[in-house]
């Protein structure tokens, strides 16, 4: 025998018992941006780079050495992080140094760690 369960969904205001209106859905362009940032943080090696850069700027060769990653691969990872706006650069002669673009990048990584260690459910 198959049992069918139906549920009536209440509006967000009633469900939470508050008078605030339900949050608006983000525009598609914003969601595209959120997805790009999420993809940039969805790689273990790039998360390693975020951890390293949390203690200060590094050159590509320093990052490659510390993250145990070949320079061409590290350059690709850094390009993804830079494209997502998570790291910035400065040039000194022929050396390019990378640093976190904002302290919130590290906050986001810490949130990911918290969610991974304490999944809801």
Image (cartoon, rainbow, N blue to C red):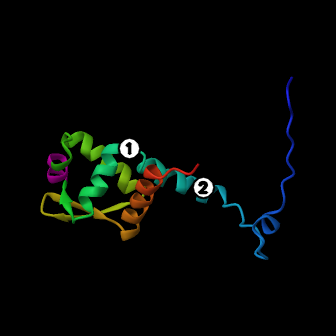
Left or right: 70 as drawn, with respect to 116: left
Residue 107 occupies quadrant: bottom left
Circle nearer the N terminus (2, 1): 2
Residue 75 at x, y percent in the picture? 26, 46
Tell me if 55 is positioned left or right of 5 in this view: left
Q: State which quadrant residue 45 falls in.
A: top left
**Residue 111's image quarter?**
bottom left
| Residue projecting furthest to the top | 1
Quadrant location of the N terminus?
A: top right
Dot in front, 2 or 1: 1
Q: Residues within 10 Å of mark 1 (few under 14, many from 20)?
A: few
Residue at image coords 24%, 57%: 52
- Identify the residue under disc 1: 43
Q: Secondary structure at mark 1?
A: loop
> Residue 43, how many percent across, how many down?
38, 44
Task: Work out whether residue 69 or residue 97 is closer to the camera in this orientation and state it.
Answer: 69
Q: Residue at x 41, y 51 (%)?
A: 41
Mark 2 touching mark 1, by CB under 8 A? no
Q: Which residue matches tag 2?
A: 31
Q: Is residue 112 left or right of residue 6?
A: left
Can residue 26 be seen here?
A: yes
**Residue 71 or residue 118, whichever sits in front:** 118
Q: Residue furthest front?
A: 1
Segment tinted magenta in the rendering: 60-65
Q: Can the viewer see residue 85 in this picture?
A: no
Q: Is residue 52 left or right of residue 29?
A: left
- Secondary structure character of the magenta stretch overall: helix
Q: How many marks?
A: 2
State the CA–CA distance, disc 2 to disc 1.
19 Å
Any mark on residue 73, and which? none
């Amino acid at each position: 025998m198959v049992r069918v369960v139906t549920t009536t969904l209440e509006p967000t205001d009633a469900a939470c018992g508050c008078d605030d209106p339900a949050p608006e859905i983000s525009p598609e362009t914003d969601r595209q941006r959120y997805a790009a940032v999420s993809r940039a943080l969805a790689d273990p090696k790039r998360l390693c780079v975020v951890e390293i850069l949390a203690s200060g700027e590094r050159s590509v060769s320093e990052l490659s050495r510390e993250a145990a990653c070949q320079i061409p691969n590290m350059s690709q990872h850094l390009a993804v992080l830079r494209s997502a706006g998570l790291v910035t650069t400065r040039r000194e002669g022929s050396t390019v140094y990378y640093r976190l673009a904002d302290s919130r990048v590290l906050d986001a990584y810490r949130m990911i760690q918290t969610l991974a260690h304490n999944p809801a459910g």
